[in-house]
Amino acid sequence: MYEMIKSIVASLFGKKGILLVRATEKAKVTNLIESLYPYQIQSELIRIGPNGDGGYLVPNDLDGIEACFSPGVGNISEFETDCLKHGMKIFLADKSVEKPNFNISEDKYDFLKKLIGCTNNNDFITMDDWVKLKCQSENSELLLQMDIEGGEYNSLINISNSLMNRFRIMVIEFHFLQELWNPYYFNVIQTVFDKILQTHICVHIHPNNCCGIDSRFGVEIPRAAEFTFIRKDRVEIKNFTYSFPHKLDYDNTENKTISLPKNWYKST
């Protein structure tokens, strides 16, 4: 009996005592990556925010967007102030800070001291309830800019289809993408991306050089990356983007520069 138990433990944990989990099938990972290949559309990409962390590339299709909802408040809020200059109302939410780092009067923005998640309580609020609480109109066009350090999966999987369709543009930083090799995390990550791709297409990916590249099984995956999506009905012309980085891309940190791996976009 002892030898049997020893054999089972060895098969699960290996020689170094590390739990071994069967990796996600390579084909599943590469198929998901290929579904996210960025497209070039009729609207050029412009940069909103600073030339560094906190700045993002979005399609130049901002006219008529009523508001920017921006969960996750960092030390830099130039993206939101640029949205204000484009005529948008700006709504921010974050439980971990007292208020945004703005040099503008408080009547120019709305801040909710809560985290965005999949439920409502003293600490969390769902995206749907946040928008319903703050936005008078039920049909206006919105922009989503989300950087919530891994909480994006729970938050996005919980968004209603009606709210998803109101976001003309979505800029989302996805974290822990190397966990695509973990079958349990893969299912969650795939579900979130599949949900987004029902209504939107990807138009840009920028790897955050904070965390480097994970290389396994001949596949390179940025551990964190910023994705830009636009709703499908805003697209008249689309062709794959064949070259990265974009001329308006900048490093997020002083770490070594990394480029989007070639397996993340269409080759010529």
Image (cartoon, rainbow, N blue to C red):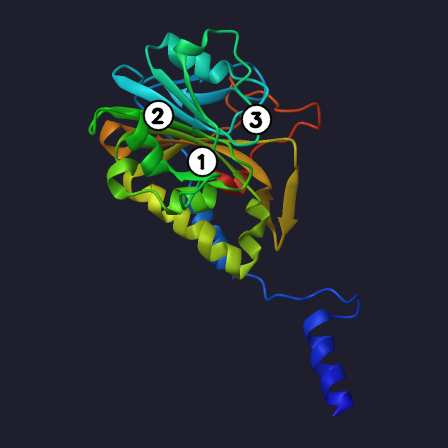
- Residue closest to the far front: 122
Provide the residue designation for mark 1: 268
Could you tell me which residue is drawn at 32 percent across and 37 percent down? 128
Mark 1 Cα within 10 Å, few/some/many (few <14, many 20+)? few
Mark 3 Cα within 10 Å, few/some/many (few <14, many 20+)? some
The amino acid beneath tag 3 is: Val
Q: Which SS class for mark 3?
A: loop
Q: Which disc, if any, is residue 143?
A: 2
- What is the quadrant of the N terminus in the image? bottom right
Q: First in sequence: mark 3 or mark 2?
A: 3
Q: Is residue 123 left or right of residue 218?
A: left
- Residue placed most toward the observer, 130 or 143: 130
- What is the quadrant of the C terminus in the image? top left
Q: Which SS class for mark 1?
A: loop
Q: CA distance from mark 1 to mark 3?
A: 45 Å
Position of residue 52 relative to residue 104, above or below, is below
- Nearer the camera: disc 2 or disc 1: 2
The amino acid beneath tag 2 is: Leu
Mark 2 Cα within 10 Å, few/some/many (few <14, many 20+)? many
Residue 163 location (% of width, % of height): 28, 36
Q: CA distance from mark 3 to mark 2?
A: 22 Å
- Whether residue 254 is visible, yes or no, is yes
Q: Which of the 4 quarters of the picture holds residue 14? A: bottom right
Q: Is residue 1 left or right of residue 75?
A: right
- Whether residue 26 is visible, yes or no, is no
Q: CA distance from mark 2 to mark 1?
A: 32 Å
Q: Which SS class for mark 2?
A: strand
Q: First in sequence: mark 2 or mark 1?
A: 2
Position of residue 230 relative to residue 31, above or below, is above
The amino acid beneath tag 1 is: Thr
Provide the residue designation for mark 3: 97
